[in-house]
Amino acid sequence: MILSGDAIQKKLGSDIHIEPFDSERLNPNSYNLRLHDELLVYEEIVLDMRTPNRYRRMSIPPEGLVLQPDRLYLGRTIERLETHNLVPMVSSRSSLTRLGLFVGTNSGFGDVGYSGHWTLELYCVQPIRIYAGVQVCEIFYHELCGEVDEYCSSKYQNANDIQPSLMFREIGSGDESEQQLELDFDRLADHSS
């Protein structure tokens, strides 16, 4: 069962935390989230899931930024979110998909207990100008049945920034230790700031 907008508002401060919250962005069964003013883009031509991939930061200026097709952009929500006893899901807003911009369409399923800013995957089918602060996606909540083990992974929990893929922590590499991979990732993150 999906929570109504009224139920979302009633659960604020207990099972649902949205900071900052604005009742103007509350929908009949979801809440609109805004796009932060920074994006990450990978610099590798071929992305390798066994290693940290280089990326660079981009700022969205006040006049907007044109996204190009066939390029993955990672962004994040302005809002910090936390959910307990419910399953959060993020979906593109239909007004944007009608312009050919897709946001987190395949990875919008969240974990119970996640806390932090949501990293958003942005992909467009033709060039489109985007703006910081735009209501880019919506979050909605499913009720759960059964015992709950809350999300507690060190990979993405408490994210305060855009999180590139950390898949390499799961599968490692044939000849490098996970510790070396983490050092490489930290170096890339520091270098790209």
Image (spheres, rainbow, N blue to C red):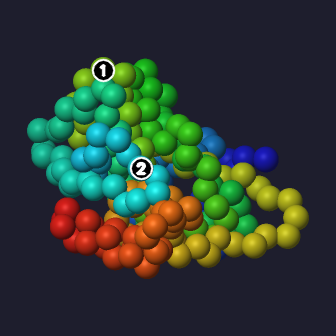
In front of the other: label 1 or label 2? 2
Residue at left offset 26%, top offset 54%: 55
Q: Which mark is residue 48?
A: 2
Q: Quadrant of residue 187?
A: bottom left
As displayed, is residue 60 above or below residue 87? above
Q: Give the quarter of the figure containing the C terminus.
A: bottom left
- Find numbered disc 1 in the image and state the secondary structure of the residue it sits on: loop
What x and y, as percent, mark residue 151?
64, 70
As displayed, is residue 148 above or below residue 77? below
Q: Earlier in the sequence, mark 1 or mark 2?
A: 2
Residue at left offset 27%, top offset 67%: 189
Residue at left offset 32%, top offset 70%: 184
As displayed, is residue 77 above or below residue 129? below
The Cα atoms of the two marked residues, 1 and 2, are separated by: 26 Å
**Where does label 1 land, which residue?**
126
- Find numbered disc 2 in the image and state the secondary structure of the residue it sits on: loop
In front: 84, or 119?
Answer: 119
For this view, does 113 lie left or right of residue 31? right
Residue at left offset 34%, top offset 55%: 53
What x and y, as percent, mark residue 54?
27, 56
Residue type at the position of mark 2: Asp
- Residue that sits furthest to the front in the current view: 175
Circles 1, 2 touching at the beta carbon (< 8 Å):
no
As displayed, is residue 128 above or below residue 159? above
Residue type at the position of mark 1: Gln
Instruction: Report whether residue 28 is seen.
Output: yes
- Residue that sits furthest to the bottom in the current view: 179
What x and y, as percent, mark residue 154?
53, 76
What x and y, as percent, mark residue 40?
28, 51
For this view, does 3 lie left or right of residue 101? right
